[in-house]
Amino acid sequence: MVNLKINNKEISCNESLTIIEAAKENNILIPNLCYLEDIHKIGSCRMCVVEVEGEKNLQASCMVPVREGMVVKTNTQRVKRARKVVYELMLSDHPSECLSCSRNQNCEFQELGEMLKVDESRFEGEVSKPFLDESSPSIVRDASKCILCRRCVTVCNEIQELGIINPQNRGFKTEIGPALELPLNSVNCSNCGQCTVVCPVGALYEKDATKPVWDAIFDEKKRVIIQTAPAIRAALGEEFGYEAGTLVTGKMVSALRDIGFDDVFDTNFAADLTIIEEGYEFLERVKNALTGKDSVLPMITSCSPGWVKYVEHDFPEALDHVSSCKSPHMMLGALAKTYYPENNNINPEDIFVVSVMPCTAKKFEISRPEMMNKGLQNVDAVLTTRELASMIKEAGIDFKSLNDDKFDDPLGLSTGAADIFATTGGVMEAALRTVYEVVTGREVPFNKLRVEPIRGLEKIKTADIIIENPLDDYKFLDGVTVKVAVTSGLSGAKQLMKEISEGTSPYHFIEIMGCPGGCISGGGQPRFSDKDTVQKRIQAIWREDEGKEFRKSHENPAIKKIYEDYLDKPLGHKSHELLHTKYTRRGVFNEYI
């Protein structure tokens, strides 16, 4: 511990902290722009400069560690003047059409200008070359708004370890993007959208889908179906002033009805369906391996389209390890255009399916040619959580005043096992709850169904499940120890995939999510700066699970009924036709190989 003064306030803090971290611990605000707690600190924006007694120059508080006896002043005339000049220089090379910007009133650069009381720049001169990249189905890159903070570079290179976007050229000509000025859709971008979450301005954002959705709603010939992913209900409230981790499931459903959607279904229904199909697929692979037949293990989950695209590019030889199951929202989309219209005398061509997802990669996923049945796309449009909030506001809906409503039947009933798909480890835990009980007739041997070893935000989590006294149909598993692993974020995926490529992987079943923390912190979720936000969202999801009547996917009565009436059995002919797919080998330029 060291003792120092910040603005004449005596404080004591750990010597490992920087000035900005010590100030935050003691409720002292230092303006900043490029800094991201625990992720990114390079001192490039110089907005967080402070005076340190004994130092000739102003110091970047995000870079300078505290020391014993240090005296810091964060708000002197010299400091304020320096910040204003730096901000005005940035503003002189930044578009001023704030009203038409997607980040208006939700822009860190705009908020900083208000804090510093800067409303115009005194500087004029050459401006950076404007460049708008709309090639990706998921992400738009507007170079004219980039402030070169390099947050996106750190997330792409150090957190996700993809290295898709980097500083190109030097000096005034510097811009952030793929090498050789290539468009995003021509490189091996996973479309995870983590760059859009950390961008403080409107330089990186999701490709807007609100217009085609509004057009479909206003088209009297269309029956517009909407489905919502489990992560949405634990984050949407943040866009309306609720504390992080507030569950707004019922109000969300009410808002969707008020917007004008004809049917409001729950992606959770299809998450339960995914567990049934994926669970039986896993058991079939294990049985084949134990009986000497051709089999590929470990099997890896396929719910995350960002992760799937990553493996197509970086480990195409390992695609057979990926489950053949479509992701849950694609499964529900397939059923919404087959099972649902067949049972309600509706022309499938008149149905328009919208998915609300925490993920930008889902926008890419719906464009895959593999995601079609009978000539129709499974899903027609994907909205991020942020886009849904925008539509609710555009419709003039007072979200906080809404009453709670419920999802429509039959594709709206789900279990707690489906809710936990939203967080890292949730898909694996849901699978274990069902697979272990199918095999043994008993509940998974963890307290209150909580498979604690695979919960949490550690990079790699593992668990061993010993099968003892299985039912007669599964005697081949007696005494087998099933080894599972869970990771979220593509850095962890790289580590596990290298083990598979080298033939050293000890696991039988692996869950991989493309975004750190899982869907709860997906690229389409509300932006945040408090690192506790993700943890609060995760806790909300666990509460949602524990409050459900049914907590195991195979107990869902709506799932039982759809197999009885339509799908026949897991891995059956109809299931393979509608719910399963194959993925594609890709090169570094997004080309098929």
Image: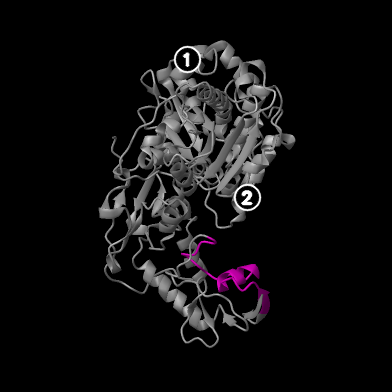
Q: Secondary structure at mark 1?
A: helix
Residue type at mark 1?
A: Lys
Residue 244 seen anywhere in this rendered image of the structure: no
**Extent of the magenta region:** 10-38
The quarter holding residue 158 reads: bottom left
| Residue tagged 2 | 535
Most frequent secondary structure within the magenta stretch: loop
Three-letter residue code for mark 2:
Gln
Q: Is residue 309 left or right of residue 229?
A: left
- Residue at the (56%, 77%) spot, across then down: 74
Q: Which residue is tagged 1?
A: 574
Assess whether residue 425 is covered by the magenta stretch: no
Decide which of 540, 407 is in the foreground and name it: 540
Above/below status of 464 relative to 273: below
User: Distance from label 1 to label 2 (Cα)?
Assistant: 39 Å
Q: Position of residue 21 (x, y in %)?
A: 58, 69
Q: Is residue 287 left or right of residue 196?
A: right
Q: Is residue 413 above or below residue 22?
A: above
